[in-house]
Image (spheres, helix red, strand yellow):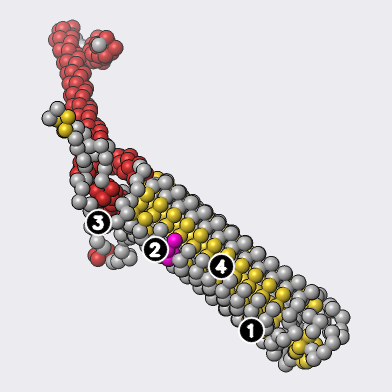
Amino acid sequence: MWWWALPAALLIGAAAWTTTTWLLQDLDKLPVAEQVSTRIEAIRTALAAAAGVGAAVTLLLAVRRQRHQELAAAHTTHDAAERRVTELYTKAAEQLGNAQAPVRLAGLYALERLAQDTPLLRQTIADVICAYLRMPYAPPPDQAATAEPAVPRAAVGGVSTAAVGRDPHEERQVRLTAQRILAAHLRYQPPPADRWWWQRRRVKLNPRHWEDIRIDLTGANLVDLDLSDCRLGEALFSQATFTGNANFRRAAFTGLAHFDQATFSDFVWFDDGTFTGLARFNWATFAGDVGFRAVTFIESTEFKQATFTGHTSFADAFFSDVVQFKEATFAVGANFGKTTFKDEAKFNEAIFSGAAWFVEAVFHDRARFDQVSFTKEALFDQTTFTGDASFSAAFFHNRAGFDRATFTGDAYFASARFKSLAAFSRTTFLTSATFISSTFADSAAFDEATFNDSVSFDDATGLGKAHLYGVRFARTGGPYRRVVLPLTWRREDTADADGWQTLRVVPAESGPHPEPASETGG
């Protein structure tokens, strides 16, 4: 090519001319007899230099030609490999549409092998398997195989036609295989603890793990799904139906996890799992027992209008962001014992038809239980409310236990209804406690409770038989506080050795409270 040959020729000529000029620059200083031989040697040297430059150019051309041949060979090999991968992928994908169950199984295993050998195709193949699981499917009424042939055929002109239907039992096995393939490659084993350099293992712990895989099983019908110990990227299970048990123990959801309107027909476990992204279970239905024990939620979590039919446990769970259980329904027991809520917790208008356990739970921010209905006992014993706690218009049909609870923020029980025992023994209210218009149909126990700030029992009813031994109020000399006690209570001011302004409150024998409804402390 001229754009390559012309610079090469100019370079060769320049080498010859430069060499000749340099060698003959002092020629006139030599004797005449030596000038001829010197010119001949200079020309010879210049030609040798030009020849060397030409040889170098030739070598570069040879290298360039070899490089082109290598690139062409590499492209040919790559194209052949791509064609082979495409053919294998296309053939395996076509097998998934076959009416014969063994052919569909072969297609699944071919896709799995292809993904394992070709990392760039793993997400695509995972999408294909998820798409297969999203196809309409009705589980068989029983697990026993029928006596009829799985794939009926008809003979026309002596030639068998293609399959016209799929046996539900065989299809169930194909779907179970697809689920197992996903689980096998999403399962992740965490690395061992740090060791000394001579003890470190150099073996790869997760050779079959497909990293950062997104799962889209929206609307899928999943049978006995087991994703325990799996690590998933974005996981979409909205409107999915989980037939049989669903196992997500120790699963890690590193992206969004959407289970909106999902239906769990039997037991489901998320114990010891981690949700790094947004977790949504809005309008989900849990027909069996539910386990969220020791689960960690990093971002916001939503269970709005979720229905829990079986026993539910969030014991030792950790909510790092806002969590919503607004209008959720708990038909049986709900255990939130020792659960930690780092941000706002919203249980507004939730219905607890069974026992509600919040024993030793910790609310670091606002806790909202407004208009919540507790049919059975509601236990908040030894619970810590660091932020404001609102139980306005809550309805406690059975025992309401707040023994030894600590309210660091304001406590609101305005218009709350207590149909049974309301236990606030040894409870500590560090800021205001509001029981305005509360109704106590049974006994109430405030034994050894501590009120460190304002107390409001305006228009509260049913406290004539309250247990009030050892109740203590704010320290002497404290800031302004509003103290409004029920009209049926009588106070006896006593001095406490530790400096508290102690008010030993006992029910009045008769008549209304003789003192003003409020006072200024100190």
Report the Cα–Cα distance between label 1 and label 3.
Answer: 60 Å
Mark 1 belongs to which amino acid? Arg
Residue 452 x, y percent position in the rendering:
72, 79
Q: Amino acid at mark 4?
A: Phe
Range of residues picked out in magenta: 287-291
Q: CA distance from mark 1 to mark 4?
A: 25 Å
Mark 4 is surrounded, within 10 Å at the Cα level, by few (under 14), some (14 to 19) or many (20 or more) other residues, namely many
Residue 426 is labelled as 1
Q: Mark 4 = which residue? A: 352
Residue name at image x 76 percent, y 76 percent = 460
Distance from the alpha carbon under mark 2 to that under mark 4: 19 Å
Q: Quick one: label 2, few (<14), some, or many (20+) residues within 10 Å?
A: many
Task: Look at label 2 and name its amino acid.
Answer: Phe
Q: Is residue 159 magenta?
A: no
Residue 108 vs residue 418, the one in the foreground: 418
Q: Nearer the viewer, mark 1 or mark 3?
A: 3
**Nearer the camera: disc 1 or disc 4:** 4
Residue indicated by mark 3: 144
Q: Is residue 283 left or right of residue 82?
A: right
The answer to which of marks 1 and 3 sits earlier in the sequence is 3
User: In terms of secondary structure, where does tag 2 sit?
Assistant: loop
- Viewport quadrant of the C terminus: bottom right
Name which residue type carries label 3: Ala
Which circle's residue, 3 or 4, is located before the other in the chain?
3
Whole-percent x, y for residue 45 in the image = 17, 15
Q: Earlier in the sequence, mark 2 or mark 4?
A: 2
Q: Is label 3 or label 4 in front? A: 3
Q: Main structural element of the magenta stretch: helix, strand or loop?
A: loop
Q: Label 1's element?
A: loop
* Residue 23 image offset from top left, x and y in percent: 23, 15
